[in-house]
């Protein structure tokens, strides 16, 4: 048999390239069992990315919820909890079947977790049909109907909005805005640029619009740094997360614009990425609704309990999931002797102020997202490691 | 027709660093992709686990390097050997399907890539890992009045050296001669008494070594993360499509072109950044179905075009 010719090899290769471009690595492995709970036991489903791109975030979300349960004898609102964990995978494609299994097969009475905004949007119709409450701890796409959806995280445009005024006050000159070209990036940057312009700030971007970088294929940010240098900006505002955040920060620190102050949404230096960035992240300012060094009783016990089982400090993702458990704890406790999906949902609506490691917050009546304080943090030395240290309070946003 | 040969309009200065960086990035892609070219051109194996071999090198760099020069050399040695070994294992796995079509090989190696990638994530965790390079390299230096990362500057020199050594190995050694002969007429080489299985093993191990070395040296540029293997595989495949098979020069030109498109091209036209690379690839495929320099080099070598 002759070897195929070069042309057929090239055709095969082009086909493979196409196939690779179309391939969406999908994996949905469900865990949990179908045991009928004992009387009084409440089944809660937790959906988070335990594999794929967002595994790090998904693991924090699972661990945050489980930590709250462990600290409260496995009970929420006096009822024993049967927590069933399922893998959200990379997005709606895997999240929807996993959520359907939790709702239809395991018959959970409430759902929590979910990393991706796209996953939340995909799961929303399934939740609406089942009429069970959802206490989301990360992804928040701004659903139209939030009658049974609650979020302990934030709306994506609130991060930038909270720091805009501070940046205007502290940067003498124009600010360059740059971010990734996906929905989360658009929301994050729009939150900053809209508010920044409103309060009289001026962008250094040539056309007054944010510079978008292709996501996820951008691994090299130097050409963009050359643009920023040429714009004459006095500071930079950005949002990146995960691997892109590591590349951005490491390359920034050795680029032509390394002396320009870098302001960012807190995700740029949050969790595992800070370890990978190392020295390059020093002095970066960021805005977030949480920092592990916040000084309040709730946070001290949360961080101490977290560190018993983990190497590093908890992230905002773990904190939001811990709060989701706290929300369900209070709501189930207030939902009567035999809590139903309906009565739990009603009870969440009546919760009022919630004590949290981030400080006190409450659900907005309109968006069902937190009305909460945002903090200015700077990457500084903390013992042997670098960490996000709170250096001040920023705006209270939400509602 | 080469994208980087396009006339630079307006002030040159803002584009100096991106142009320089395009060379560094291109040379990294060259070292990473040349192994894939050998696999495909010589052993006729479409190895979709090639990105995994790079990732092995990158993860070992993160695990072994502690900021000293000795650990850098150790990581380079261990990373190269480990990836070469993985390449050898791959040759063993592929032996039963060596004469089957590319789809079979692609499925097998893609499966290995997915499984191996998952193993790396299990072993090293889902986060991006820090890579500690010697302090002398972990800073920026002045180049014609601009700041540029010292490591990348040194990397350009090292990668250029690897390129020269590779060219010498292919052009001047007996192994290189066999490789070139196998590209031209594999059946004839088999008739001459050279076992194709042994060529396959050698080529896959050598390809693994190149990918592993690229992974260790490139770890500070394309660092170890769960997506590393996919990123490197995709860019390497683009280099293969642009550069054609079986010539070191073609691969080098294509890799530099991809590097400059990703760097200088993005600096010149940031709005088109998402499309530049694949637009260039489509253009080349449309104009010359066999890649940029393939036909020219084959003709010059007196082979069949």
Image (cartoon, helix red, strand yellow):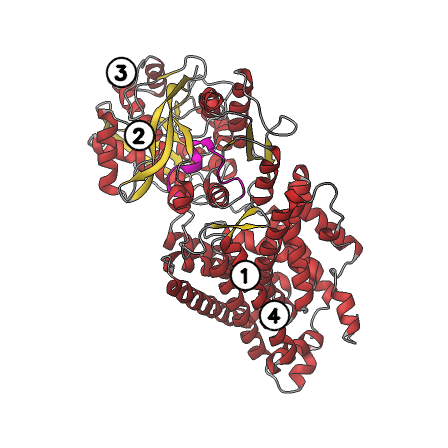
Q: Are there few (<14), some (14-19), or many (20+) residues within 10 Å of tag 1?
A: many
Q: Is residue B192 left or right of residue A153?
A: right
Nearest-to-viewer mark from 3 and 2: 2
Nearer to us in this view, B84 or B104: B84
* Mark 2: secondary structure: helix
**Numbered range of the magenta stretch:** A256-272
Please check the rendered image and state whether residue A264 is part of the magenta-colored stretch, yes or no.
yes
Q: Mark 2 lies on which chain?
A: A
Q: Which residue is drawn at 49% across and 24% down?
A: A157
Which residue is tagged 2?
A322
Instruction: Return the x and y of residue A44 as percentages of the image width and height.
Output: 33, 30
Does residue A40 appear in this view?
no
Q: How far apart are marks 3 and 4 (CA)?
A: 74 Å
Nearest-to-viewer mark from 3 and 4: 4
Residue furthest bottom in the image: B193
Q: Residue at x 41, y 37 (%)?
A: A269
Q: Quarter of the image holding residue B11?
A: top right
Q: In this view, does A346 lie to the left or right of A164?
A: left
Q: Quarter of the image holding residue A54?
A: top left
On whether disc 3 and disc 4 are found on a single subunit, the reply is no
Which residue is tagged 3?
A334
On whether disc 1 and disc 4 are found on a single subunit, the reply is yes
Q: How far apart are marks 1 and 4 (CA)?
A: 22 Å
Instruction: Return the x and y of residue A125 as percentages of the image width and height.
Output: 50, 25
Q: Which mark is residue B164?
A: 4
Q: Mark 4 lies on which chain?
A: B
Q: Residue at x 47, y 36 (%)?
A: A95
In the displayed structure, B198 sits above or below A329; it is below
């Amino acid at each position: 048999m002759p070897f195929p010719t070069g042309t057929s090899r090239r055709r095969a290769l082009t086909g493979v390239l196409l196939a690779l471009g179309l391939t969406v690595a999908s994996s949905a492995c469900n865990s949990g069992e179908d045991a009928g709970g004992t009387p009084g036991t409440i089944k809660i489903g937790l959906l988070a990315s335990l594999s794929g791109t967002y595994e790090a975030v998904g693991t924090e979300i699972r661990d945050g919820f489980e930590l709250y349960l462990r600290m409260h004898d496995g009970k929420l609102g006096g009822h024993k909890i049967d927590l069933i964990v399922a893998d959200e995978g990379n997005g709606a494609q895997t999240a929807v079947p996993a959520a359907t299994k939790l709702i239809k097969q395991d018959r959970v009475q409430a759902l929590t977790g979910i990393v991706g905004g796209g996953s939340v949007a995909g799961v929303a119709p399934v939740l609406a049909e089942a009429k069970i409450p959802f206490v989301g701890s990360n992804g928040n796409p701004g659903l139209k109907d939030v009658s049974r959806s609650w979020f302990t995280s934030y709306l994506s445009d609130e991060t930038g909005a909270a720091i805009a005024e501070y940046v205007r006050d502290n940067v003498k000159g124009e600010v360059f805005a740059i971010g990734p070209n996906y929905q989360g990036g658009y929301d994050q940057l729009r939150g900053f640029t809209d508010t920044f312009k409103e309060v009289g700030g001026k962008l250094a971007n040539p056309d007054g619009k944010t510079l978008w970088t292709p996501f996820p294929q951008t691994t090299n940010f130097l050409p963009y740094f050359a643009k920023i240098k040429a714009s004459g900006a006095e500071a930079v505002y950005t949002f990146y997360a995960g691997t892109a955040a590591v590349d951005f920060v490491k390359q920034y620190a050795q680029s032509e614009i390394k002396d320009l102050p870098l302001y960012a949404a807190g995700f740029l230096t949050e969790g595992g990425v800070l370890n990978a960035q190392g020295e390059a992240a020093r002095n970066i300012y960021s805005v977030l609704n949480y920092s592990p060094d916040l000084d309040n009783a709730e946070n001290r016990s949360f961080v101490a309990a977290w560190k018993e089982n983990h190497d590093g400090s908890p992230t905002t993702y773990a904190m939001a999931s811990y709060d989701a458990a706290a929300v369900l704890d209070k709501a189930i406790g207030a939902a009567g002797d035999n809590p139903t999906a309906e009565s739990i949902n009603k009870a969440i609506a009546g919760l009022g102020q919630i004590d949290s490691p981030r400080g006190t917050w409450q659900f907005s009546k309109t968006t069902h997202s937190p009305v909460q304080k945002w903090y200015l943090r700077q990457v500084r030395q903390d013992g042997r490691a670098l960490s996000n240290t709170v250096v001040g309070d920023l705006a209270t946003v939400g509602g | 027709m080469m994208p980087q040969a396009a006339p630079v309009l307006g002030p040159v200065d803002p584009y100096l660093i991106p142009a320089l960086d395009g060379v560094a990035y291109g040379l990294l892609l060259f070292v990473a992709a040349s192994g894939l070219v050998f696999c495909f051109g010589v052993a006729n194996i479409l190895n979709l686990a090639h990105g995994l071999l790079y990732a092995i090198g990158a993860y070992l760099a993160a695990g072994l390097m502690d900021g000293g020069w000795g650990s850098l050399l150790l990581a380079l040695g261990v990373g190269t050997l480990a990836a070469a070994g993985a390449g050898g294992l791959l040759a063993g796995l592929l032996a039963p399907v060596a004469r089957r079509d590319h789809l079979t090989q692609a499925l097998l190696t893609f499966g290995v890539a997915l499984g191996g990638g998952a193993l790396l994530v299990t072993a090293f965790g889902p986060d991006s890992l820090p890579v500690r390079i010697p302090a002398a390299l972990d800073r920026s230096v002045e180049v014609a009045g601009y700041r540029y990362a010292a490591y990348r500057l040194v990397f350009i020199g090292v990668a250029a050296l690897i390129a020269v050594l590779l060219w010498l190995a292919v052009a001047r050694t007996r192994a290189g001669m066999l490789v070139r002969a196998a590209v031209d007429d594999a059946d004839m080489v088999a008739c001459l008494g050279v076992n194709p299985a042994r060529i396959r093993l050698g080529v896959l191990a050598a390809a693994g070594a190149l990918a592993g070395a690229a992974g260790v040296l490139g770890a500070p540029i394309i660092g170890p993360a769960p997506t590393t293997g996919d990123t490197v595989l995709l860019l390497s495949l683009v280099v293969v499509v642009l550069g054609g098979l079986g010539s070191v020069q073609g691969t080098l030109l294509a890799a530099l072109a991809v590097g400059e498109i990703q760097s200088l091209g993005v600096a010149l036209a940031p709005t088109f950044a998402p499309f530049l690379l694949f637009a260039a690839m489509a253009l080349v495929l449309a104009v010359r179905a066999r890649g940029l320099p393939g036909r020219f080099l084959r003709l010059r070598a007196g082979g069949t075009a």
